[in-house]
Amino acid sequence: MTLRVRIVAVVAVVVAAVVLVVGVLVHRSTESSLVGEIDSDLVERAEALRPDRVSGRPISDEDLERLQQFEGAAPLLGERLRGGRTDPFGRTVGFDVLARVLDESGAVRLVLDAEFEAATDADLLARARVGPVLTDGTSAGDAVRVVTTALPNLGFVQYARSLEEVDSVLASLRARTLVIGLSAIVGAGLVAWFLAGRTVRPIVELTDATEYVARTGDLERGVVTAASGTGDEVGRLSASFTSMLDALSASRRQQRRLVMDASHELRTPLTSLRTNVDVLRRGHVLSADQRDEVVADLDAELGELSDLVSELVDLATDMRENEDVAPLTLVEVAGPVVERARRRTNRPIEIVTVREVVLEGRPEAIGRGVRNLIDNAAKFSPAGTPIRVLIDGGRLTVHDQGPGVPEGERERIFDRFHRVESSRTLPGSGLGLAIVRQVADAHGGSVFADDSPDGGAAIGFVLPTVDG
Protein backbone atom coordinates (compact mmCIF):
# COMPACT_ATOMS: atom_id res chain seq x y z
CA MET A 1 0.00 0.00 0.00
CA THR A 2 1.48 3.31 -1.08
CA LEU A 3 1.70 6.31 1.23
CA ARG A 4 -0.91 8.11 -0.84
CA VAL A 5 -3.39 5.25 -0.47
CA ARG A 6 -2.70 5.05 3.26
CA ILE A 7 -3.41 8.76 3.69
CA VAL A 8 -6.70 8.39 1.80
CA ALA A 9 -7.62 5.35 3.90
CA VAL A 10 -6.92 7.21 7.15
CA VAL A 11 -8.99 10.21 6.04
CA ALA A 12 -11.86 7.92 4.97
CA VAL A 13 -11.79 6.09 8.31
CA VAL A 14 -11.78 9.36 10.26
CA VAL A 15 -14.67 10.80 8.23
CA ALA A 16 -16.61 7.52 8.60
CA ALA A 17 -16.10 7.59 12.36
CA VAL A 18 -17.26 11.23 12.56
CA VAL A 19 -20.33 10.47 10.40
CA LEU A 20 -21.15 7.45 12.57
CA VAL A 21 -20.87 9.39 15.83
CA VAL A 22 -22.88 12.34 14.49
CA GLY A 23 -25.48 10.01 13.00
CA VAL A 24 -25.94 8.13 16.27
CA LEU A 25 -26.25 11.38 18.23
CA VAL A 26 -28.75 12.87 15.76
CA HIS A 27 -30.76 9.62 15.72
CA ARG A 28 -30.97 9.49 19.51
CA SER A 29 -31.78 13.19 19.77
CA THR A 30 -34.53 12.93 17.14
CA GLU A 31 -35.99 9.79 18.73
CA SER A 32 -36.01 11.42 22.15
CA SER A 33 -37.68 14.55 20.74
CA LEU A 34 -40.40 12.65 18.86
CA VAL A 35 -41.18 10.32 21.75
CA GLY A 36 -41.27 13.37 24.02
CA GLU A 37 -43.90 14.96 21.76
CA ILE A 38 -46.05 11.83 21.98
CA ASP A 39 -45.61 11.67 25.74
CA SER A 40 -46.63 15.32 26.06
CA ASP A 41 -49.76 14.67 23.97
CA LEU A 42 -50.72 11.62 26.07
CA VAL A 43 -50.18 13.46 29.35
CA GLU A 44 -52.27 16.39 28.11
CA ARG A 45 -55.10 14.03 27.18
CA ALA A 46 -54.84 12.33 30.58
CA GLU A 47 -55.05 15.68 32.32
CA ALA A 48 -58.22 16.44 30.30
CA LEU A 49 -59.99 13.49 32.03
CA ARG A 50 -59.86 15.02 35.46
CA PRO A 51 -63.40 15.05 36.92
CA ASP A 52 -63.63 18.83 36.69
CA ARG A 53 -62.66 18.83 32.98
CA VAL A 54 -64.65 15.95 31.54
CA SER A 55 -66.87 17.36 28.75
CA GLY A 56 -65.69 20.81 29.83
CA ARG A 57 -68.05 20.83 32.82
CA PRO A 58 -68.27 19.35 36.31
CA ILE A 59 -69.24 15.67 36.37
CA SER A 60 -72.89 15.30 37.22
CA ASP A 61 -74.44 12.59 39.34
CA GLU A 62 -75.67 10.99 36.14
CA ASP A 63 -72.14 11.01 34.64
CA LEU A 64 -70.77 9.41 37.76
CA GLU A 65 -73.39 6.70 37.67
CA ARG A 66 -72.66 5.96 33.98
CA LEU A 67 -68.91 5.80 34.62
CA GLN A 68 -69.42 3.55 37.62
CA GLN A 69 -71.36 1.10 35.48
CA PHE A 70 -68.81 1.48 32.57
CA GLU A 71 -71.63 1.23 30.11
CA GLY A 72 -71.54 4.89 29.14
CA ALA A 73 -67.80 5.41 29.43
CA ALA A 74 -67.11 5.03 25.70
CA PRO A 75 -69.01 8.12 24.48
CA LEU A 76 -67.85 10.12 27.49
CA LEU A 77 -64.18 9.31 26.91
CA GLY A 78 -64.57 9.58 23.17
CA GLU A 79 -65.37 13.27 23.50
CA ARG A 80 -61.80 13.76 24.67
CA LEU A 81 -60.18 11.06 22.51
CA ARG A 82 -61.62 12.30 19.24
CA GLY A 83 -60.95 15.93 19.99
CA GLY A 84 -58.39 17.65 17.83
CA ARG A 85 -55.73 20.30 18.10
CA THR A 86 -55.21 23.43 16.06
CA ASP A 87 -51.89 23.66 14.24
CA PRO A 88 -50.11 27.01 13.59
CA PHE A 89 -52.13 27.35 10.35
CA GLY A 90 -55.50 27.13 12.09
CA ARG A 91 -56.29 23.60 10.91
CA THR A 92 -57.75 20.92 13.20
CA VAL A 93 -55.47 17.89 13.49
CA GLY A 94 -56.77 14.61 14.92
CA PHE A 95 -54.78 11.92 16.71
CA ASP A 96 -55.16 8.17 16.57
CA VAL A 97 -55.27 7.21 20.23
CA LEU A 98 -56.32 3.92 21.75
CA ALA A 99 -57.98 3.80 25.17
CA ARG A 100 -59.29 1.39 27.76
CA VAL A 101 -60.89 1.63 31.20
CA LEU A 102 -59.67 -0.34 34.23
CA ASP A 103 -61.40 -0.93 37.52
CA GLU A 104 -59.77 -0.35 40.90
CA SER A 105 -58.05 -3.77 40.74
CA GLY A 106 -56.56 -3.09 37.28
CA ALA A 107 -58.88 -5.42 35.36
CA VAL A 108 -59.85 -4.23 31.86
CA ARG A 109 -63.54 -3.33 31.84
CA LEU A 110 -63.90 -1.39 28.61
CA VAL A 111 -61.83 -1.15 25.35
CA LEU A 112 -62.19 1.66 22.83
CA ASP A 113 -61.08 0.95 19.25
CA ALA A 114 -58.34 -1.74 19.40
CA GLU A 115 -56.88 -3.78 22.21
CA PHE A 116 -53.30 -3.13 23.41
CA GLU A 117 -50.98 -4.60 26.02
CA ALA A 118 -49.65 -2.49 28.85
CA ALA A 119 -48.64 -2.85 32.51
CA THR A 120 -51.44 -2.87 35.10
CA ASP A 121 -49.54 -3.95 38.21
CA ALA A 122 -50.29 -2.56 41.67
CA ASP A 123 -47.18 -0.38 41.80
CA LEU A 124 -48.08 1.36 38.52
CA LEU A 125 -51.70 1.90 39.68
CA ALA A 126 -50.48 3.35 42.97
CA ARG A 127 -48.31 5.88 41.13
CA ALA A 128 -51.16 6.65 38.69
CA ARG A 129 -53.34 7.78 41.63
CA VAL A 130 -50.78 10.55 42.20
CA GLY A 131 -50.44 11.63 38.55
CA PRO A 132 -50.18 10.35 34.95
CA VAL A 133 -47.61 7.53 34.50
CA LEU A 134 -45.93 6.84 31.13
CA THR A 135 -44.91 3.30 30.13
CA ASP A 136 -44.24 1.24 26.99
CA GLY A 137 -46.65 -1.25 25.48
CA THR A 138 -47.61 -3.07 22.28
CA SER A 139 -50.60 -3.17 19.96
CA ALA A 140 -50.82 -5.80 17.23
CA GLY A 141 -47.06 -6.27 17.48
CA ASP A 142 -46.26 -2.56 17.16
CA ALA A 143 -44.69 -0.48 19.92
CA VAL A 144 -46.91 2.08 21.65
CA ARG A 145 -46.52 4.62 24.43
CA VAL A 146 -49.06 4.31 27.23
CA VAL A 147 -50.19 6.80 29.87
CA THR A 148 -52.15 5.63 32.90
CA THR A 149 -54.24 8.09 34.90
CA ALA A 150 -56.79 7.65 37.74
CA LEU A 151 -60.46 8.54 37.78
CA PRO A 152 -60.98 9.18 41.51
CA ASN A 153 -63.16 6.53 43.12
CA LEU A 154 -64.01 5.12 39.69
CA GLY A 155 -60.90 3.33 38.33
CA PHE A 156 -58.23 4.10 35.76
CA VAL A 157 -57.97 5.10 32.11
CA GLN A 158 -55.02 4.08 29.84
CA TYR A 159 -54.31 5.93 26.62
CA ALA A 160 -51.97 4.36 24.04
CA ARG A 161 -50.42 6.00 21.00
CA SER A 162 -48.52 4.11 18.31
CA LEU A 163 -44.80 4.79 17.70
CA GLU A 164 -45.14 3.87 14.04
CA GLU A 165 -44.78 7.48 12.93
CA VAL A 166 -41.63 7.79 15.07
CA ASP A 167 -40.18 4.62 13.52
CA SER A 168 -41.02 5.94 10.05
CA VAL A 169 -39.25 9.24 10.70
CA LEU A 170 -36.24 7.47 12.20
CA ALA A 171 -36.03 5.07 9.28
CA SER A 172 -36.06 8.00 6.87
CA LEU A 173 -33.42 9.73 8.99
CA ARG A 174 -31.20 6.64 8.95
CA ALA A 175 -31.48 6.35 5.16
CA ARG A 176 -30.60 10.01 4.68
CA THR A 177 -27.74 9.78 7.15
CA LEU A 178 -26.39 6.76 5.30
CA VAL A 179 -26.57 8.53 1.94
CA ILE A 180 -25.02 11.72 3.34
CA GLY A 181 -22.37 9.72 5.18
CA LEU A 182 -21.37 7.72 2.12
CA SER A 183 -21.27 10.91 0.06
CA ALA A 184 -19.09 12.57 2.71
CA ILE A 185 -16.70 9.59 2.82
CA VAL A 186 -16.40 9.43 -0.97
CA GLY A 187 -15.97 13.21 -1.20
CA ALA A 188 -13.36 13.24 1.57
CA GLY A 189 -11.56 10.35 -0.11
CA LEU A 190 -11.41 12.19 -3.44
CA VAL A 191 -10.18 15.40 -1.79
CA ALA A 192 -7.64 13.41 0.25
CA TRP A 193 -6.47 11.63 -2.91
CA PHE A 194 -5.86 14.98 -4.60
CA LEU A 195 -4.17 16.61 -1.60
CA ALA A 196 -2.17 13.47 -0.78
CA GLY A 197 -0.89 13.44 -4.34
CA ARG A 198 0.44 16.98 -3.94
CA THR A 199 1.86 16.18 -0.51
CA VAL A 200 3.47 12.88 -1.47
CA ARG A 201 4.88 14.08 -4.79
CA PRO A 202 8.15 15.41 -3.28
CA ILE A 203 8.60 12.15 -1.35
CA VAL A 204 8.03 10.14 -4.53
CA GLU A 205 10.58 12.30 -6.36
CA LEU A 206 13.05 11.85 -3.50
CA THR A 207 12.45 8.09 -3.55
CA ASP A 208 13.03 7.97 -7.31
CA ALA A 209 16.27 9.91 -6.87
CA THR A 210 17.57 7.59 -4.14
CA GLU A 211 16.66 4.52 -6.21
CA TYR A 212 18.43 6.04 -9.21
CA VAL A 213 21.58 6.66 -7.14
CA ALA A 214 21.44 3.15 -5.68
CA ARG A 215 20.97 1.66 -9.14
CA THR A 216 23.53 3.67 -11.10
CA GLY A 217 25.95 4.93 -8.46
CA ASP A 218 25.73 8.40 -10.03
CA LEU A 219 26.37 10.90 -7.23
CA GLU A 220 26.37 13.96 -9.47
CA ARG A 221 22.61 14.09 -9.85
CA GLY A 222 21.01 16.66 -7.57
CA VAL A 223 17.67 16.17 -5.87
CA VAL A 224 15.12 18.82 -6.84
CA THR A 225 11.59 18.16 -5.59
CA ALA A 226 8.37 20.14 -5.49
CA ALA A 227 9.15 20.98 -1.85
CA SER A 228 12.75 22.08 -2.43
CA GLY A 229 13.43 25.42 -0.80
CA THR A 230 10.12 25.46 1.10
CA GLY A 231 11.70 24.91 4.51
CA ASP A 232 9.23 22.21 5.55
CA GLU A 233 10.23 18.69 6.58
CA VAL A 234 10.29 17.29 3.03
CA GLY A 235 12.14 20.34 1.75
CA ARG A 236 14.79 20.01 4.47
CA LEU A 237 15.07 16.29 3.73
CA SER A 238 15.64 17.02 0.04
CA ALA A 239 18.27 19.63 0.88
CA SER A 240 19.98 17.26 3.31
CA PHE A 241 19.99 14.46 0.75
CA THR A 242 21.44 16.80 -1.87
CA SER A 243 24.14 17.90 0.58
CA MET A 244 24.91 14.27 1.35
CA LEU A 245 25.24 13.47 -2.37
CA ASP A 246 27.51 16.50 -2.83
CA ALA A 247 29.69 15.37 0.08
CA LEU A 248 29.87 11.82 -1.26
CA SER A 249 30.64 13.10 -4.74
CA ALA A 250 33.39 15.37 -3.42
CA SER A 251 34.80 12.49 -1.38
CA ARG A 252 34.81 10.25 -4.44
CA ARG A 253 36.58 12.93 -6.51
CA GLN A 254 39.15 13.37 -3.77
CA GLN A 255 39.72 9.62 -3.62
CA ARG A 256 40.21 9.43 -7.36
CA ARG A 257 42.59 12.38 -7.27
CA LEU A 258 44.45 10.81 -4.36
CA VAL A 259 44.80 7.51 -6.21
CA MET A 260 46.00 9.23 -9.37
CA ASP A 261 48.46 11.44 -7.49
CA ALA A 262 49.66 8.55 -5.36
CA SER A 263 50.20 6.36 -8.42
CA HIS A 264 52.23 9.17 -9.98
CA GLU A 265 54.33 9.69 -6.86
CA LEU A 266 54.87 5.98 -6.33
CA ARG A 267 56.32 5.51 -9.80
CA THR A 268 59.53 7.38 -8.93
CA PRO A 269 60.62 5.35 -5.87
CA LEU A 270 59.42 2.10 -7.45
CA THR A 271 61.38 2.85 -10.63
CA SER A 272 64.46 3.67 -8.56
CA LEU A 273 64.04 0.47 -6.55
CA ARG A 274 63.69 -1.59 -9.70
CA THR A 275 66.82 0.02 -11.19
CA ASN A 276 68.87 -0.63 -8.08
CA VAL A 277 67.64 -4.23 -7.92
CA ASP A 278 68.70 -4.71 -11.54
CA VAL A 279 72.11 -3.30 -10.66
CA LEU A 280 72.42 -5.70 -7.74
CA ARG A 281 71.62 -8.60 -10.04
CA ARG A 282 74.83 -7.73 -11.84
CA GLY A 283 76.66 -7.73 -8.55
CA HIS A 284 79.69 -9.56 -9.98
CA VAL A 285 80.69 -6.38 -11.84
CA LEU A 286 80.27 -4.09 -8.81
CA SER A 287 82.94 -3.21 -6.35
CA ALA A 288 82.32 -3.32 -2.64
CA ASP A 289 81.94 0.47 -2.48
CA GLN A 290 79.49 0.46 -5.37
CA ARG A 291 77.47 -2.30 -3.72
CA ASP A 292 77.35 -0.39 -0.45
CA GLU A 293 76.23 2.72 -2.32
CA VAL A 294 73.42 0.82 -4.07
CA VAL A 295 72.27 -0.76 -0.80
CA ALA A 296 72.25 2.65 0.91
CA ASP A 297 70.22 4.03 -1.97
CA LEU A 298 67.78 1.13 -1.66
CA ASP A 299 67.44 1.75 2.07
CA ALA A 300 66.71 5.45 1.50
CA GLU A 301 64.17 4.69 -1.21
CA LEU A 302 62.46 2.14 1.02
CA GLY A 303 62.33 4.69 3.84
CA GLU A 304 60.74 7.27 1.57
CA LEU A 305 58.33 4.68 0.25
CA SER A 306 57.33 3.68 3.80
CA ASP A 307 56.75 7.32 4.75
CA LEU A 308 54.72 7.88 1.61
CA VAL A 309 52.52 4.84 2.25
CA SER A 310 52.01 5.88 5.89
CA GLU A 311 50.98 9.39 4.87
CA LEU A 312 48.70 8.05 2.15
CA VAL A 313 46.96 5.87 4.74
CA ASP A 314 46.52 8.91 7.01
CA LEU A 315 45.00 10.91 4.19
CA ALA A 316 42.72 8.12 2.99
CA THR A 317 41.51 7.32 6.53
CA ASP A 318 38.99 9.52 8.28
CA MET A 319 40.92 10.21 11.47
CA ARG A 320 37.76 11.51 13.14
CA GLU A 321 36.58 7.94 13.60
CA ASN A 322 39.68 6.84 15.52
CA GLU A 323 39.30 8.87 18.71
CA ASP A 324 36.78 10.87 20.65
CA VAL A 325 36.71 14.63 21.11
CA ALA A 326 38.05 15.76 24.49
CA PRO A 327 38.91 19.07 26.21
CA LEU A 328 42.58 19.92 25.76
CA THR A 329 45.12 22.71 25.27
CA LEU A 330 47.65 23.03 22.48
CA VAL A 331 50.42 23.26 25.07
CA GLU A 332 49.72 19.82 26.53
CA VAL A 333 49.42 18.29 23.04
CA ALA A 334 52.52 19.95 21.60
CA GLY A 335 54.79 19.26 24.62
CA PRO A 336 55.33 15.50 24.07
CA VAL A 337 55.57 16.00 20.29
CA VAL A 338 58.30 18.61 20.69
CA GLU A 339 60.20 16.40 23.15
CA ARG A 340 60.25 13.49 20.71
CA ALA A 341 61.22 15.82 17.84
CA ARG A 342 64.23 17.09 19.82
CA ARG A 343 65.56 13.58 20.21
CA ARG A 344 64.80 12.63 16.60
CA THR A 345 66.21 15.74 14.89
CA ASN A 346 68.96 16.52 17.43
CA ARG A 347 68.30 20.23 17.20
CA PRO A 348 66.95 22.85 19.67
CA ILE A 349 63.15 23.17 19.59
CA GLU A 350 61.40 25.47 22.07
CA ILE A 351 57.76 26.13 22.93
CA VAL A 352 56.72 29.73 23.55
CA THR A 353 53.28 30.14 25.14
CA VAL A 354 51.56 33.50 24.84
CA ARG A 355 48.10 32.40 25.95
CA GLU A 356 46.82 28.97 26.98
CA VAL A 357 43.12 28.25 26.43
CA VAL A 358 40.93 25.14 26.33
CA LEU A 359 39.58 23.73 23.09
CA GLU A 360 37.78 20.52 22.14
CA GLY A 361 39.63 18.23 19.78
CA ARG A 362 41.22 14.85 19.08
CA PRO A 363 44.65 14.76 20.76
CA GLU A 364 46.31 12.22 18.46
CA ALA A 365 45.15 13.95 15.26
CA ILE A 366 46.26 17.39 16.48
CA GLY A 367 49.58 15.89 17.64
CA ARG A 368 50.10 14.45 14.16
CA GLY A 369 49.54 17.90 12.67
CA VAL A 370 52.06 19.48 15.07
CA ARG A 371 54.61 16.76 14.27
CA ASN A 372 54.26 17.32 10.53
CA LEU A 373 54.77 21.06 10.98
CA ILE A 374 57.95 20.44 12.98
CA ASP A 375 59.23 17.84 10.47
CA ASN A 376 58.57 20.31 7.66
CA ALA A 377 60.54 23.01 9.51
CA ALA A 378 63.38 20.58 10.27
CA LYS A 379 63.60 19.53 6.64
CA PHE A 380 63.98 23.05 5.29
CA SER A 381 66.05 24.59 8.10
CA PRO A 382 69.86 24.44 8.08
CA ALA A 383 71.29 21.78 10.38
CA GLY A 384 71.63 22.89 13.97
CA THR A 385 69.35 25.93 13.67
CA PRO A 386 66.59 26.24 16.27
CA ILE A 387 62.88 25.77 15.67
CA ARG A 388 60.33 27.80 17.63
CA VAL A 389 56.75 26.63 18.36
CA LEU A 390 54.55 29.61 19.26
CA ILE A 391 51.16 28.94 20.92
CA ASP A 392 48.64 31.76 21.31
CA GLY A 393 45.25 30.39 22.38
CA GLY A 394 44.00 28.18 19.56
CA ARG A 395 46.72 29.35 17.16
CA LEU A 396 49.92 27.29 16.77
CA THR A 397 52.79 28.57 14.59
CA VAL A 398 56.08 26.80 13.82
CA HIS A 399 58.93 29.21 12.95
CA ASP A 400 62.04 28.05 11.14
CA GLN A 401 65.16 29.67 9.65
CA GLY A 402 64.92 28.07 6.22
CA PRO A 403 64.49 29.70 2.81
CA GLY A 404 60.81 30.56 3.47
CA VAL A 405 57.83 30.07 1.16
CA PRO A 406 57.33 32.29 -1.91
CA GLU A 407 54.16 34.35 -1.60
CA GLY A 408 52.59 32.75 -4.68
CA GLU A 409 53.10 29.24 -3.24
CA ARG A 410 51.67 29.80 0.27
CA GLU A 411 48.18 28.56 -0.53
CA ARG A 412 49.35 25.62 -2.63
CA ILE A 413 51.83 24.12 -0.15
CA PHE A 414 48.87 22.53 1.67
CA ASP A 415 47.77 20.67 -1.48
CA ARG A 416 48.55 16.99 -1.79
CA PHE A 417 51.92 16.19 -3.38
CA HIS A 418 52.66 19.84 -4.04
CA ARG A 419 56.26 20.91 -3.46
CA VAL A 420 57.92 24.26 -3.94
CA GLU A 421 60.15 24.33 -7.02
CA SER A 422 63.32 24.88 -4.97
CA SER A 423 62.63 21.83 -2.77
CA ARG A 424 61.81 19.20 -5.36
CA THR A 425 65.21 17.56 -4.94
CA LEU A 426 64.73 17.16 -1.20
CA PRO A 427 63.28 13.94 0.24
CA GLY A 428 59.59 13.93 1.08
CA SER A 429 56.20 13.09 -0.39
CA GLY A 430 54.50 16.47 -0.32
CA LEU A 431 51.76 15.09 1.94
CA GLY A 432 52.83 16.37 5.37
CA LEU A 433 51.20 19.79 5.12
CA ALA A 434 48.16 18.29 3.38
CA ILE A 435 47.63 16.21 6.51
CA VAL A 436 47.95 19.37 8.63
CA ARG A 437 45.14 20.99 6.64
CA GLN A 438 43.02 17.84 6.95
CA VAL A 439 43.44 17.92 10.74
CA ALA A 440 42.50 21.61 10.87
CA ASP A 441 39.47 21.11 8.62
CA ALA A 442 38.29 18.18 10.75
CA HIS A 443 38.27 20.48 13.80
CA GLY A 444 36.61 23.42 12.04
CA GLY A 445 39.87 25.37 11.83
CA SER A 446 42.18 26.73 9.13
CA VAL A 447 45.84 26.74 8.07
CA PHE A 448 48.19 29.57 7.12
CA ALA A 449 51.73 30.26 5.86
CA ASP A 450 53.68 33.50 6.25
CA ASP A 451 57.17 34.93 6.69
CA SER A 452 58.83 34.34 10.05
CA PRO A 453 60.71 37.03 11.98
CA ASP A 454 63.34 34.33 12.54
CA GLY A 455 64.20 34.56 8.85
CA GLY A 456 62.36 31.55 7.45
CA ALA A 457 58.71 30.45 7.22
CA ALA A 458 55.93 30.67 9.79
CA ILE A 459 53.47 27.84 9.10
CA GLY A 460 50.65 26.69 11.38
CA PHE A 461 46.94 26.30 12.05
CA VAL A 462 44.14 27.95 14.01
CA LEU A 463 41.52 25.87 15.88
CA PRO A 464 38.31 27.18 17.52
CA THR A 465 38.44 27.40 21.32
CA VAL A 466 35.75 26.69 23.89
CA ASP A 467 35.44 30.37 24.89
CA GLY A 468 35.29 31.44 21.24
Image: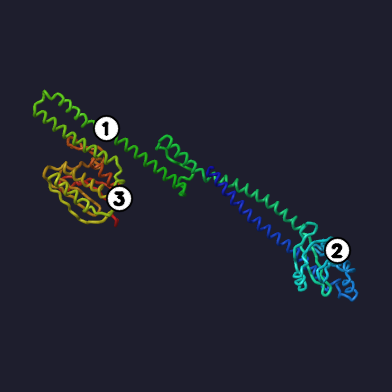
Real-space CA distance between mark 1 and mark 2, rounded to the nearest whole angstrom: 117 Å
Which of the two labelled residues, at mark 3 and mark 2, occupies the earlier sequence position?
2
Which of the two labelled residues, at mark 1 and mark 3, occupies the earlier sequence position?
1
Q: Which mark is residue 112?
A: 2
- Dot 1: few (<14), some (14–19), or many (≥20) neighbours within 10 Å? few
Residue position for label 1:
263
Q: Does the image show residue 93?
A: no
- Dot 3: few (<14), some (14–19), or many (≥20) neighbours within 10 Å? few
User: Element type at marker 3?
Assistant: loop
* In-front residue for pair 168/111: 111
Which of the two labelled residues, at mark 1 and mark 2, occupies the earlier sequence position?
2
Real-space CA distance between mark 1 and mark 3, rounded to the nearest whole angstrom: 32 Å
Which quadrant would the N terminus be assigned to in this image? top right
Q: Is residue 379 above or below residue 328?
A: above
Residue at the image point whose x is 17% and y is 49% from the top = 338
Q: Amino acid at mark 2?
A: Leu
What x and y, as percent, mark residue 117? Answer: 79, 62
The residue mark sitting in front, 1 or 2, is 2
Q: Quadrant of residue 243?
A: top left
Real-space CA distance between mark 3 and mark 2, rounded to the nearest whole angstrom: 99 Å
Residue position for label 3:
324
Contact (CB < 8 A) between labels 1 and 2? no
Q: Amino acid at mark 3?
A: Asp
* In-front residue for pair 80/318: 80
